[in-house]
Image (spheres, rainbow, N blue to C red):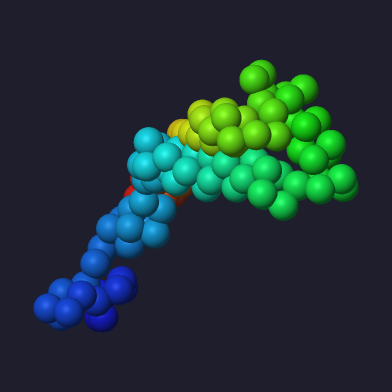
Amino acid sequence: MKEQGISRRSGEALLPEQVFVRAFARLDAVAFGLAIGVVRGGGGWGGGVVGVVGGGEPLGPHLALLSQYIPGYAVSWRGSLVGAVAGLTAGFAVGWTIAVLRNLTISIYMFASTLWVRLNRFLDDV
């Protein structure tokens, strides 16, 4: 009988449990948080720079509304740095939370699935 699973380069087959674990690998919460934070911080900085360099009438007042959400923000070079720090901080918090919740959900799902399979095997033997 042929073994099920994904074969490696050496010709060995992976067990179904190993395939399951590889398919649902854990996310590194700090790395995911930093990735989201850097992108969001870059957006905060870029928005401030665009407001300073190419501001004009339609863009400046709209960007100034960010000061209601980000303390210390203004359409200036200093404000773009404040927006970058606020974006990095908020992005890290959101990314870290998403990664932790995803890892928790996958862990619960994997536990429930393996428990269900073992229970079915046990009941088949009885």
Of residue 29 and residue 42, the one placed in the foreground of this image is 42
Q: Residue at x 65, y 34 (%)?
A: 76
Q: Residue at x 76, y 38 (%)?
A: 63
Q: Quadrant of residue 31?
A: top left
Of residue 8 and residue 85, the one placed in the foreground of this image is 85
Q: Residue at x 78, y 32 (%)?
A: 64
The answer to whether residue 83 of the structure is visible from this angle is no
The extreme top residue here reads: 71
Question: Residue 78 at x, y = what percent?
Answer: 57, 30
Question: Relative to residue 81, is residue 35 depicted above or below?
Answer: below
Question: Residue 106 at x, y = what percent?
Answer: 46, 43
Q: Quadrant of residue 83?
A: top right
Question: Relative to residue 11, is residue 25 depicted above or below?
Answer: above
Of residue 28 and residue 81, the one placed in the foreground of this image is 81
Instruction: Say left or right for 22 vs 56.
Output: left
Question: Residue 45 at x, y = what percent?
Answer: 57, 41
The answer to whether residue 72 of the structure is visible from this angle is yes
Instruction: Say left or right for 45 vs 125.
Output: right
Q: Residue at x 77, y 22 (%)?
A: 68
Instruction: Say left or right for 9 vs 28.
Output: left
Instruction: Say left or right for 8 vs 97.
Output: left
